[in-house]
Amino acid sequence: MARLPRLIVPEQPHHVIQTGNNNQVVFQDGEDYHAFLGWLRTAAKNYKVAVHAYVLMPNHLHLLVTPSDEHGLAQMMQWVGRYYVPYFNQKYSRSGTLWNGRYKTSLIDADAYFMLCSRYIESNPVRCGLVGRMEDYAWSSYCHHAGIRPDGLVIDHPKFWELGNTPFQREAAYVALSQPLTTAQIDTISKALLKGWPLGSEGFKTALQHKVKRQVLPAKRGRPFKIKPEG
């Protein structure tokens, strides 16, 4: 089934993925990771996008972000690309595209899925066998949330603040939550992200569809999408 047109809703969290062209490596050494994160921090500030969680993998990246308007997320990603791609191409004597098309995104029901998506993102290096523990991976937001190392890129979401009244309580609660995800949880998040579907309860999806006055879910066969008039 075809991926739906990209849906961006201000003040709602979005799960973003961008992959290397043909799954090629896009970060080869520490300098590359640092450069990308520096430009991402600048762009997030300039375009008013709050970055809540992230991971940079050798051939792709994940972000959990909240844009303040409909255009900031796209502007942020484009701005970073304008700086990072020429940097990477010049450094490694290559030319042409670096990314596999445009980034993909899934709008998130914060109440039901925010913490799960944050764990999904930060546990990616463990699932891929790069490290044995999340705290051993340098290029994610986990160490910030676990209280190991502050990260100036990260802006904590209200769902994180709900974990406790003090930084220590929140960090300890987050570490306690950071258990391996089930196969079903991984599949649910991955499918929504790759298809561009919103991730949330049925009530959330229905309310969202009426709020934005457009299709946000795959249409049932033979039945065109319609929005019922209010009142």
Image (cartoon, rainbow, N blue to C red):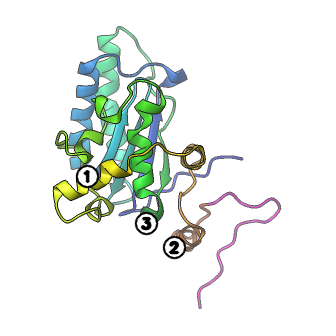
The answer to whether residue 141 is visible is no
In the rendered image, is residue 182 in sight? Answer: yes
In percent of the image, x 69 and y 72: which residue is there? 226
Q: Of the residues under marks 2 and 1, which one precedes in the sequence?
A: 1
Q: Nearer the viewer, residue 221 or 63?
A: 63
Report the residue at 48% width, 56% height from top.
107
Where is residue 116 shown, x and y percent of the image? Answer: 44, 52
Left or right: residue 189 compared with residue 125: right
The 10 Å Cα crowd at callout 1, few under 14, some 14 to 19, many 20 or more, is: some
| Residue to which mark 3 is pinned | 111
Q: Which residue, given by chain and number where applicable, does mark 1 sit on?
A: 172
Q: Which residues are magenta?
A: 217-231
Q: Secondary structure at mark 1?
A: helix
Q: Quadrant of residue 83?
A: top left
Could you tell me how far apart the alpha carbons at marks 2 and 1 are, in whole angstroms?
37 Å
* Residue contact between numbered discs 3 and 2, judged by CB atoms under 8 Å: no
